[in-house]
Amino acid sequence: MPLLVMKFGGTSVADLDRIKNAAAKVKREVDRGYNVIVIVSAMSGKTNELVNWVEQTSPLFDAREYDAIVSSGENVTAGLMALTLQEMSVPARSWQGWQVPINTTSAHSSARFVSIPRENLDTKFDEGMRVAVVAGFQGVSPEGRITTLGRGGSDTTAVAFAAAFEAERCDIYTDVDGVYTTDPRISQKARKLDKIAFEEMLELASLGAKVLQTRSVELAMRYNVRLRVLSSFEDTDETSGTLVCGEDELMESKVVSGVAYSRDEAKMTLVTVEDRPGIASAIFGPLADAGVNVDMIVQNISERDYEGHAGAVTDMTFSCPINQVARAQKAMEDAKAAGKIGYDDLVIDTDVAKVSVVGIGMRSHAGVAAMMFKALSAENVNIKVISTSEIKISVLIDRKYMELAVQALHDAFELEKAV
Ligand code: ASP
Ligand code: MG
């Protein structure tokens, strides 16, 4: 029988009525002839509550117990979903991660998949089970302990099952009706996309378009899992939502598909560091060790004969999430105190945001950067740092201009005409 994976996020299973509504969507697919693997999140707010309980009980908690506790929200929804389906006369049962088993590494709270053997579920499907309701977000380590995959991990569970069971499609039901050209709260002209390429979605997901966990998109791209994002609050059919798929399925790639932003950025500049082999390593090594996620990096050209310096000097600028600034600052000050790096000043700017345009069409179109900079300059937005990749151009700007910049870029690339 053909197989579908259907994933329901926290808001889609927030109470018993919502679970019934989701179950009805599953039943419809069963009636159409599909076997279904349903992946469920915890009811919305539940995981946060559990995390809170852990932190209140033990500030330096044992990560294995953290996973045992925070994974439990999914167990409840899986059982309730199975019961609801049974009430609708659909042969269904629930599966916790260890029962499948979903084998993961033992990196608690950020475990990775090792394998998902098909045997147990396949046997039950052969015996007439039509729906396997699997608790998302969790797995089991080689030591036999419960693991979790990191916040938002149920998306990744869904894609992993779609890959392992060669599902026809992986439908991600959520509280929005698809992927938009930008955040509709920022630009009223934002349009829902019918299709988007894996690579574009990956950039948008990691840039803060929080529809899908980034890892789930990476996995979908690797295994070519067709991923559909759609609303569980609306009547949906085969054509609803946004399909995240390979480039070959896109009719024609747009130059720019979306404008993304990330509000909580900070910029740090090491002023007059010595320019010598190994200096980047001496700066970014300690930052990595301190767990700072450095994003953009700019090294200025070298200046010679700089006042008070024997050799060549340069300025090094990088950006990181704002909540990592204190850690980054300490790492730099410690490295300086230890004599590993030298700099005259550390300038920190916590009032910046990142705005990016993304599109696979950029690979074959010139002039996208020029057009972006022109649109920003027309609004008098000053660009502080620029970085580019094959399918993305990002700028760091003053946070107070973020909305304006997103709107201007959305207009400049005529995304209101996107489909
Ligand atoms: N319930 C987990 C979380 O809130 C996993 C998920 O919903 O994807 O992060
Ligand atoms: Mg989610």
Image (cartoon, rainbow, N blue to C red):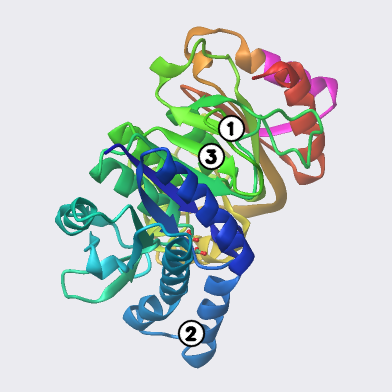
The residue that disc 3 covers is 229
Front tag of 2 and 1:
1
The amino acid beneath tag 1 is Ser
The amino acid beneath tag 3 is Val
The amino acid beneath tag 2 is Val
Quadrant for the N terminus in the image? top left
**Residue 240 circle label:** 1
Tell me how far mark 3 sits from mark 1, CA to CA.
Answer: 8 Å
Which circle's residue, 3 or 1, is located before the other in the chain? 3
Q: Is residue 170 above or below residue 127?
A: above
Q: Is residue 359 above or below residue 204?
A: above
Which residue is painted at 53% across and 41% down in the image? 205
Percent of width and height locating residue 48: 56, 73
Callout 2 secondary element: helix
The residue that disc 2 covers is 54
Tell me how far mark 2 sits from mark 3, CA to CA.
Answer: 32 Å
Dot 3 surroundings within 10 Å: few (below 14), some, or many (20 or more)? many
Callout 3 secondary element: strand
The one nearer the camera, 205 or 13, is 13
Callout 1 secondary element: loop
Looking at the rendering, the stretch of residues picked out in magenta corresponds to: 371-384
Which residue is painted at 50% across and 30% down in the image? 243
Tell me how far mark 2 sits from mark 1, CA to CA.
Answer: 39 Å
Q: Is mark 1 within 8 Å of ligand 2?
A: no
